[in-house]
Image (spheres, rainbow, N blue to C red):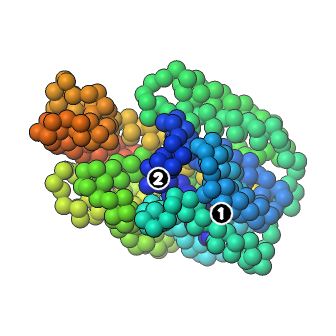
Amino acid sequence: MLPLLFVSMDVSILFYALPAIGADLRPGSTQQLWILDMYGFVLAGLLITMGALGDRVGRRKVLIAGTAVFAAASVAAAYAQSPGALIAARALLGVGGACLMPSTLALVRNLFHDPGQRARAVAVWTTVLATGISVGPVLSGALLEHFWWGAVFLVNLPAMALLLVLAPLLLPESKSPAPGRFDTLSAVLSLAALLPLIHGIKELAAHGFRPLPTLGIAAGLCLGLVFLRRQARLAHPMVDLALLRHRAFGGSVAVNLLAMAATVGFAPFFSQYMQSVLGKSPFEAAMWSLVPSLGVLVAAPVGGALARRFDRGYVMAGGFLVSAAGFLWLTRTGVDSPLWTTLAGSAVYAGGLVAAMTLANELALGAAPPERAGSAAAVLESGQELGGALGMALLGSVGAAVYGRDMNAAVPAAVPDAARETLGGAVAVARQLPHRLGETVLASADRAFTHSLGMAAAGAAAVMTGAAVLCVVLLRGVRTPR
């Protein structure tokens, strides 16, 4: 769990460190976006390659190598002297993370052969993954109050050093008994397909329709099709297409993709609401964001207990419907809503969602043969990364459209356009306006943003309802193989 915790933390640990990095390194707007996104892009692009490599050379070897790369990249990022150096270090962190994530889940598959033990292990795995994403901003906020921004990377080093010592002693090696040849062309194709696809989706979410990101998505889809056709012809493919057609595995990948779309797509609305509307400091907002994780700690074991007594497909569908109810609760969030109501709704949606995701992860992992565990874990995690990008695009577009329409109707035409584009832009514009007009712009922006949050929550609820339907259609009656 050590590598998983820190890999997941690095997804979100820069959220509050960017202003300090901006003041020190002075990156341009494009460089700042790459500093934030490079890690996730490389991580997503290499997951399938590293999962297949672990199946062939040994998951423990790949885990240890990834740990060394992750530690070295953390030092390089902490002491980067230029935006380009930091972007390169973040890319190297993505390489290390891609080695670590599928290896952890594949090792779980091979360590726990008893379905009951494996179910508990996967529940812990999913909880640690969700906790790491939640803890990242909290740890970042705490460190930035006392140290320089590089400390958010150096915090990884004690755990990485511990892992380098303990992994050879505690983790047995596991790999496929008949791995076959590693196909370099497939590795290149998987990277070439996923990178432009995820980058294009994020660019469309951030800036609306543009020709270049659209071409990138089209190119990624075409290369993805070439990749799949090649897998169908190989004797030892990176991705087993027969496994994807298996209801337990393919259905779990699909519902996991939808779960991450709702989670990642809605997360920016929650953090902006806490800081810009409620006026919390970054550290306060991060601390309050931990409260919904209490729902996760309660719901994950409850979901597992129910799945032992009732049909797994129905239990997962129930978890997604609970999550949809939490999102629907958040559609009523207003500027003056008590904080506890927002936190309660967030706890409900997070609890239901993680309970269902835990069961989906367990089902997918149980359906995969032990010798293909690394590749199976990589496909599952790649689906999650793609779901996160889609969620940011879809829910972000909904929120931006609602916010822009409300602001166009609420503020005078003379107010700069930046106030109509984002809540952050409205705050910046309001500081430059006469006092009364600035207050009007801020009040209008808060109302428009909470309306956009509500509509994004409604979209997330619809996605969760769709996931529940998929669970009933695809996963009803499916049992975890022993």
| Image side of residue 62 versus residue 328, left or right | right
Find residue 403 and report its horizontal and vertical position in percent.
27, 36
Query: Which residue type does callout 2 highlight?
Result: Ala
Q: Which quadrant of the figure contains the N terminus?
A: bottom right
Kind of residue indicated by mark 1: Leu
Give the residue furthest to the left.
436
Nearest to the observer: residue 102 or residue 425? 425
Q: Circle 1 sits on which residue?
A: 105
User: Total number of numbered labels?
Assistant: 2
Picture residue at 63% right of the left edge, 42% below the top = 84
Answer few, some or many: residues within 10 Å of disc 2's Cα (few below 14, many 20 plus, some between 14 and 19): some
Q: Could you say which disc has been placed on residue 376 in the image?
A: none
At a point 74% along the width and 63% down the height, the residue shown is: 68
Left or right: residue 455 versus residue 111 is left
> Which of the pair 424/22 is nearer the observer?
22
x and y percent of residue 278 in the render?
A: 24, 55
Badge number at residue 20: 2
Is disc 2 placed on a helix, strand or loop? helix
What residue is shown at x 54% (from left), y 27% (from top)? Answer: 213
What secondary structure is marked by label 1? helix
Q: Is residue 239 left or right of residue 388?
A: right
Residues under numbered marks 1 and 2 in contact, where contact means CB atoms less than 8 Å apart: no
> Eyeballing the image, is 37 above or below 17?
above
Q: Can the viewer see residue 123 in this picture?
A: yes
- Please identify the quarter of the rendering in which residue 287 is found: bottom left
Q: Residues within 10 Å of mark 1 (few under 14, many from 20)?
A: many
